[in-house]
Amino acid sequence: MTQLAAHSFDKAMFRLELQGVPRAHVQLTRDKLLQPDVGLIRQLENRVASLPRLAADVTQRKAEAQTRIEQATRTLEGGFKHEAALRDAREKAADINAALEKLQRDQEPEPAPEQMDPDVARMRRLHAASYPGRPGVGPAPQAPKGPATRPWLPGRDTHRNDLGR
């Protein structure tokens, strides 16, 4: 006998069951359990009378479950019956993808050399000359040429620039 959840003990429900026999239970209120009447006795007699039918039903369900287990085991052991076709389809798809990639590479035009505006090219050269970058990176900076690049001499006035000012 098991007591089920209730708000008060007077309204509590109890479950009577035969141990080891599934689905052979009766739920009763506390009042019916303490003061059995003809209806309760008839209900219990009907439960006892239905036990052989219940046992046959449980046996049949157990056999059906066992059959399903065996079928599932055979299915799992058998493997995927279309495995070879799936493998062939994957290989064919890979071949098609490779052919499409090759076709796309063959149809792509060769990139044309970038045509630069002469003014932009001149500005880039001036920028590269003015900002040569970090030492050891890129081409070595070239020394500017012309009258403004005379080397320093010991007798030369350092306060005057190369233009004589």
Image (spheres, grey):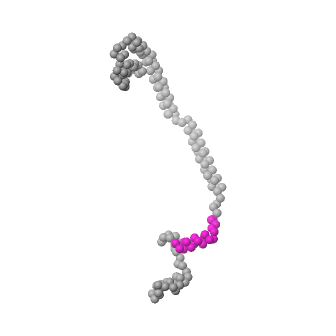
Residue at screen point 36% across, 22% down:
12
The correct choice, above or below, for 42 with respect to 111 in the image is: above
Residue at screen point 46% across, 19% down:
57
The one nearer the camera, 127 or 158, is: 158
Magenta stretch: residue 128 in it? yes
Q: Look at the image and give the residue range highlighted in magenta.
A: 113-131
Residue at screen point 51% across, 32% down:
75
- Expressed as whole percent of the image width and height from the top left, the position of residue 6 reads 37, 24
Count how many numbered circles sit on residues in the image.
Answer: 0
Q: Residue furthest bottom?
A: 155
Residue at screen point 54% across, 72% down:
128
Instruction: Name the image quarter holding the N terminus.
Output: top left
The one nearer the camera, 153 or 90, is: 153
The correct choice, above or below, for 52 with respect to 160 in the image is: above
The one nearer the camera, 111 or 117, is: 117
Can residue 3 be seen here? The reply is: no
- Expressed as whole percent of the image width and height from the top left, the position of residue 107 reads 66, 55
Q: Residue furthest top?
A: 38
Quarter of the image where one finds residue 40: top left
Can residue 31 be seen here? The reply is: yes
- Expressed as whole percent of the image width and height from the top left, the position of residue 34 reads 33, 16
Q: In the drawing, does residue 95 fall left or right of residue 155?
A: right
Quarter of the image where one finds residue 29: top left
Magenta stretch: residue 165 in it? no
The correct choice, above or below, for 158 with respect to 64 in the image is: below
- Expressed as whole percent of the image width and height from the top left, the position of residue 137 reads 50, 69
- Assign the magenta stretch its main secondary structure: helix
